[in-house]
């Protein structure tokens, strides 16, 4: 049976742990809002890119959209996970989703190039037998996203021109609300032609289109680079929001379990203290009775 002192120590340890969990829960909630604001801020930027594409495509839609679609021979996989733990099954789910898609696409392991953002998700993918070609760490805030996006674009260029990778896909967890998220895939390159056709068919707001004097191919290429930036930045922000949503859920469960444990410890403590007091009273009564017997 535990003593009151040992129960006090356990109650103190549980209280300290509860404080840490509450702090982590608050930080996760703040981080979710931070990354959601980053996603929201991309909307105007993305709209500007789409308007630029709309102008170029309306001027030369045939030359841009009638190029033959290439068959996928080598696949570039960019998967977003986490470096830190305490985020539930986030890494396990996105790694399984990624590998299932690659298998369904019919591309053999030797014809895949994998870039992992986050060491935890890289471990799951490697455990499944898929080598990791590049590994990047996750940023700690929105300020660290842009340099990593630029680094990924450099990797894409290298794989495309030196390793003949012809298709690139993004795999990340997309944040929904609260602690809810789901795995998501985006074909980054080649750019989806149906999406380009939809943009080209949209009605322009004014009577006449803006005039551009630069070469159409050059403008189109520059706008596609901006599209890559927006897509990668969004993937980072959505993935980080999902990571913190999963961590928030884990901390909520941990908080509930610790509070229940503390209640049990309080009950045990009061029961043990009452038993100790009762035993002491019995000892006093027994001693008093023994003294009375000796006196008589």
Image: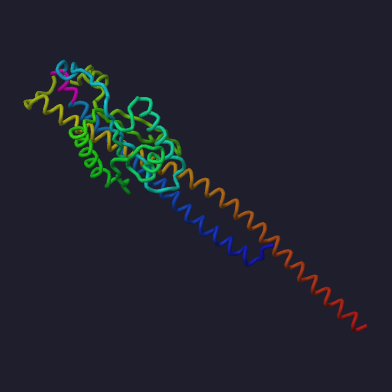
Query: How many numbered discs?
Result: 0
Q: Residue at x 53, y 45 (%)?
A: 253
Front residue of this view, candidates 64 and 156? 156
Decide: is 112 above or below 69.
below
Q: Position of residue 123 (x, y in %)?
A: 39, 43
Decide: is 142 above or below 104.
below
Front residue of this view, candidates 296 and 119? 119
Secondary structure, magenta segment, majority class = helix
Q: Residue at x 22, y 42 (%)?
A: 151
Q: Position of residue 88 (x, y in %)?
A: 46, 43
Q: Residue furthest left?
A: 213
Residue 180, quarter of picture: top left
Q: Residue at x 9, y 23 (%)?
A: 211
Residue 110, quarter of picture: top left
Horizontally, residue 269 falls left or right of residue 147, namely right
Q: Residue furthest right?
A: 296
The color scheme shown is: rainbow
Which image quadrant: the C terminus?
Answer: bottom right
Q: Is residue 114 magenta?
A: no
Q: Residue at x 64, y 54 (%)?
A: 264
Q: Residue furthest front?
A: 110
Which image quadrant: the N terminus?
Answer: bottom right
Q: Is residue 58 magenta?
A: yes
Decide: is 203 above or below 83.
above
Q: Position of residue 134 (x, y in %)?
A: 28, 42
Decide: is 5 above or below 288.
above
Front residue of this view, candidates 149 and 111? 111
Range drawn in magenta: 53-60
Q: Position of residue 187 (x, y in %)?
A: 29, 28
């Amino acid at each position: 049976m535990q003593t009151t002192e040992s129960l006090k120590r356990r109650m103190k340890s549980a209280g300290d742990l509860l404080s840490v969990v509450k702090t982590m829960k608050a930080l996760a909630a703040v981080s979710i809002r931070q990354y959601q604001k980053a996603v929201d801020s991309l909307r105007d930027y993305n709209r500007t890119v789409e308007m630029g594409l709309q102008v170029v495509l309306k001027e030369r839609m045939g030359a841009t959209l009638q190029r033959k679609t290439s068959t996928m021979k080598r696949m570039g996989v960019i998967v977003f996970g986490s470096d830190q733990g305490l985020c539930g099954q986030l890494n396990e789910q996105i790694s399984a989703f990624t590998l299932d898609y690659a298998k369904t696409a019919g591309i053999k392991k030797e014809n895949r190039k994998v870039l992992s953002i986050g060491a935890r998700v890289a471990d799951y993918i490697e455990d499944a037998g898929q080598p990791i070609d590049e590994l990047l760490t996750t940023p700690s805030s929105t300020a660290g996203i842009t340099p990593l996006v630029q680094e990924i674009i450099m990797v894409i260029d290298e794989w495309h021109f030196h390793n003949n990778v012809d298709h690139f896909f993004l795999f990340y967890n997309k944040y929904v609300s609260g602690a809810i998220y789901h795995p998501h895939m985006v074909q980054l390159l080649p750019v989806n032609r149906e999406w380009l056709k939809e943009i080209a068919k949209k009605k322009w707001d004014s009577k006449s289109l803006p005039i551009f004097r630069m070469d159409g191919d050059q403008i189109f290429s520059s706008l596609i680079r901006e599209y890559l930036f927006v897509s990668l930045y969004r993937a980072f922000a959505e993935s980080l929001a999902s990571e913190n949503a999963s961590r928030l859920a884990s901390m909520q469960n941990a908080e509930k379990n610790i509070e229940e444990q503390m209640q049990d410890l309080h009950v045990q403590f009061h029961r043990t203290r009452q038993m100790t007091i009762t035993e002491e009273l019995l000892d006093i009564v027994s001693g008093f009775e023994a003294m009375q017997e000796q006196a008589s």
